[in-house]
Amino acid sequence: MVARKSLKGDYCPSARSLDVIGDWWSLLIVRDAFDGLTRFGEFQKSLGIAKNILTERLRTLVSSGILELVPTSEGGTRMEYRLTAMGKDLFPVMVALRQFGERHLFAPAEEHSLLVDRTSGQPVRLDIKAQDGRSIGPDETIILKVPEEE
Amino acid sequence: MVARKSLKGDYCPSARSLDVIGDWWSLLIVRDAFDGLTRFGEFQKSLGIAKNILTERLRTLVSSGILELVPTSEGGTRMEYRLTAMGKDLFPVMVALRQFGERHLFAPAEEHSLLVDRTSGQPVRLDIKAQDGRSIGPDETIILKVPEEE
DNA sequence: ATTATTGGTTTAATAATGCAACCGATCCCA
DNA sequence: TGGGATCGGTTGCATTATTAAACCAATAAT
């Protein structure tokens, strides 16, 4: 097996994102981070991931700039993993995945966790809009390709 | 290796989404589908994926209801893979990934493909809002857990 | 009628992942 | 201060997943 193809050079921003967080575990770790988890053991317990794999994924997420390793707030010498500003920019990705799951992957009466506005307690909404404010879907858009990529 | 843990029973909609499209290739296939590709050979050429893996992923995406296999528009007996309505609902996920990539994974002057409104030619925007229309970020939200999941 | 293309399947090798055992450093507690 | 438990890993080995390459039947093109 030659090394798995890297998408680093791809001109498509989605592909580059997937190159960084597109593997099986990374987005689940990020989800847990948004959910407030910070410690190695917390992620390990929450996800049931093998510890060596978790080690490697956390390292990759840190070196990608999505997580950072900072001293725990409770003093002591131990460290915790926290979302960076860049990591928090994955919020729309998480919300979009959540929205898709809510819409298609739950039975009508089935309960699920809910993302709500902290102040109002109401669910958040995600919209894709044109410049003029119209909501638009995939059929109203096109992807402009850059003229020459090698 | 015991079979990879399924997140089907997870009460978190994001986790269920990742259970369906969270592997390495599926979202890249979906991206290509949004980009207009429909044929086995087109995906294979575009992604450089091994053919047996592509076969399996396409099968999974079809059985998940994200793609469907329909007769080609040009007549003939061959089939093509098309996004279903459910598949098109992954649009916000793709846009969110794109936006993240644009913001963090390209050098300032580096060119990338661009998703634009078909009628105006202007880039699309993605916003997460509270009910009252305010844009909100991760720190203004909380995830309500369902009271009891086993 | 012949050849090329499409859409796969099969096989064997390699890489990724998981599990369990281990380990040093810290933390908790008496 | 000592002793055990916990944390955050590392290491080795077994199992799965992915790959590349060869092969193949059915269709399409010439």
Image (cartoon, coloured by chain):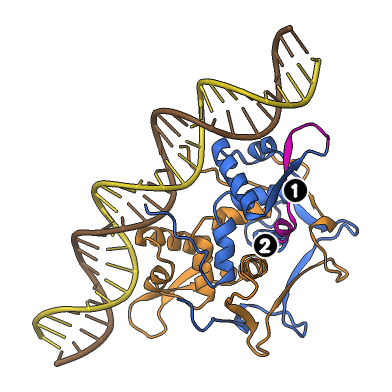
Chain colours: A orange, B blue, C brown, D yellow
| Residues marked 1 and 2 touching at CB (< 8 Å) | no
The residue shown at (70%, 56%) is B87
For the residues labelled 1 and 2, the Cα–Cα distance comes to 14 Å
Q: What's under tag 2, amino acid-wise?
A: Val
Residue A118 position in % (x across, y down): 63, 87
Instruction: Tell me if A57 is positioned left or right of B25 in this view.
Output: left
Disc 1: which chain? Answer: B
Residue A70 position in % (x across, y down): 43, 75
Element assignment for label 2: helix
Q: What's under tag 1, amino acid-wise?
A: Asp
Q: Which residue is mark 2?
A: B93
Residue B106 position in % (x across, y down): 65, 56
Does residue B141 appear in the picture of this structure? yes
The residue shown at (65%, 90%) is A119
Per the rendered image, the range of residues in magenta is: B74-89
Q: Is residue B130 magenta?
A: no
Q: Which residue is mark 1?
A: B35
Tell me which corner region of the image, top left, top right, bottom left or bottom right, holds residue D29.
top right
Does residue A83 appear in the picture of this structure? no
Q: Earlier in the sequence, mark 1 or mark 2?
A: 1
The residue shown at (56%, 43%) is B56
Residue A83 position in % (x across, y down): 52, 72
Q: Which mark is residue A85?
A: none
- Give above or below for A138 relative to A89: above
- Give above or below for B71 relative to A59: above
